[in-house]
Each structure stands twice: as structure tokens, then as C-alpha cells.
Amino acid sequence: MHQKKEKAAINHGNNVDQAQLQAYLEKEMADFQAQLDDMLKEHEAALKSITVTERDMLEIKRIYHRLVKKIHPDINPAATGSRELMDLWHRVTIAYSCNSLKDLQELEVLVMQALEAVDLDDLDIPDIEEKISDLEKEIMKIMETDPYQYKFLLADSKAVEAKKEDLKTELKTYEDYSKQLDEVLEGLLGSGVKLTWKMN
């Protein structure tokens, strides 16, 4: 991309400011390195995070499914009339996405209390099984796509090492490209050609 800009500058009779170009490339490399460092930190933090046991995961799903039957807006439209229930539903979805068993257990108690207060606990909901089935399909779709799948990739140490190597190779490619640009500029400037190029 930079070589194209250089050729365009030459064709327009402009000077290439090598110092400015070098500063730009160094900034780009620094940004890339910072992004790489952030990715590595996030990966290490994810590996150190608390893992959820299979037993806890099953309990999380059971509680979530119970709460879905009671206050999910699509399954129990009457629940949308309660601001408290809708607030609790949003908290339930967050706790479920974070696999927080403790929060879901506490929220289930709060939901039951709120349902008793608004007298929606024994509400008859038509087609409830079909609605639950549709929601389960939606959940499965989410679990099979990114970024949910990243947690499984992070647990695979071989895949993580392979990704690190890919990133190192990409970084090396950028460094080599920067050196090539330096050589091109030195060659152009050493041949006596006067180049000007103003960067945006």
C-alpha cells in the first residue's frame, strides 16, 4: 500500500519525506504491537479465570430454563407489564451469559418474590413448550458461533500456541515490509531523483 503511494508521489513529481514516512510506519508497527500485547493479555486472563464445573453448568441451565418459563417476554408477555420483572430478566440473561450460578440462584428467589407480588406465578401460557423449544434453538445457535466459541479455543493450548506463532509471523512480515520500504526510499533518493510526498 505504501509502495503504491510512493509511486503515485513520484508520478506526480512530489517529494517523499522519508522521515515522515518512517515515523508513520513506526507508529503503525507500535499500534500493531500494542494490539498483539492486548490479545495476549486477554488470552492469559481468560485462562486464569474460574472454570465452571459440569455439575454447576447443568444447574445453571436448569435455573435458567425455569426462569425462562416464568418471565421471558416472548413466553410470558404479561411479565413485560412489570418493570421489576423486566429488570430481573435482564439480570438473568447477564448472569447466564457469565455462567454465574450464585447470581442465578439469588435471582430465582427474587423472581419468585416478584411473581407473587404481581400474581403472575400461575399464569397459563399457551404454546409454552413450543416457545421454549424455539428459545433453546436460539441459545444453541449462539453457543455455536463466535465469540462464544472463543472460550473453547482458548482452552486448547495447541491452538493458542499456533495462533501466537501466526501473529509473530504476521508481525515479522510487517517488519520485513518496513525494511523493504526503507531500501526502496534509499534507492530512489540515492539515484538523484527529487521526490516530494505530503501525507494526509
Image (tube, rainbow, N blue to C red):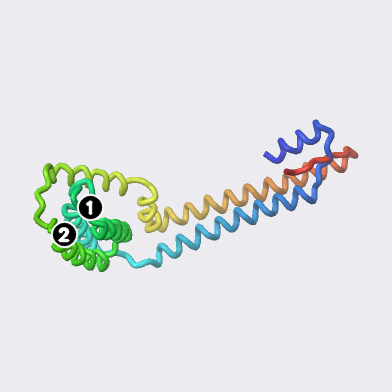
- Give neighbour class at mark 2: few <14, some 14-19, many 20+ (Cα, 10 Å): few
In front here: 175 or 98? 98
Tell me where residue 6 appears, x and y as whole percent. 76, 38
Labelled disc at residue 81: 1
Which residue in the structure is indicated by mark 2? 118
Determine whether the residue tagged by mark 2 lies in a helix, strand or loop. helix
> With 76 as the anchor, is 86 left or right in this view?
right
> With 116 as the anchor, is 106 left or right in this view?
right
Residue type indicated by callout 2 = Val
Q: Residue furthest right?
A: 192
Labelled disc at residue 5: none
The quadrant the N terminus occupies is top right
For the point 50% across and 60% down, which residue is it? Answer: 40
Residue type indicated by callout 1 = Gly
Tell me where residue 80 appears, x and y as whole percent. 23, 51
In front here: 56 or 100? 100
N-term-proximal mark, 2 vs 1: 1
> With 57 as the anchor, is 192 left or right in this view?
right
Determine whether the residue tagged by mark 1 lies in a helix, strand or loop. helix
Figure check: 184 above or below 27: above
Figure check: 172 above or below 134: below
Tell me where residue 61 appears, x and y as whole percent. 21, 57
Q: Badges 2 and 1: C-beta atoms under 8 Å apart?
A: yes
Would you identify the image quadrant in which residue 50 lies? bottom left
For the point 81% across and 42% down, which residue is it? Answer: 16
For the point 60% across and 51% down, which residue is it? Answer: 171
Tell me where residue 63 appears, x and y as whole percent. 19, 60
For the point 37% across and 58% down, which residue is it? Answer: 155
The quadrant the C terminus occupies is top right
Q: CA distance from mark 2 to mark 1?
A: 10 Å
Would you identify the image quadrant in which residue 87 lies? bottom left
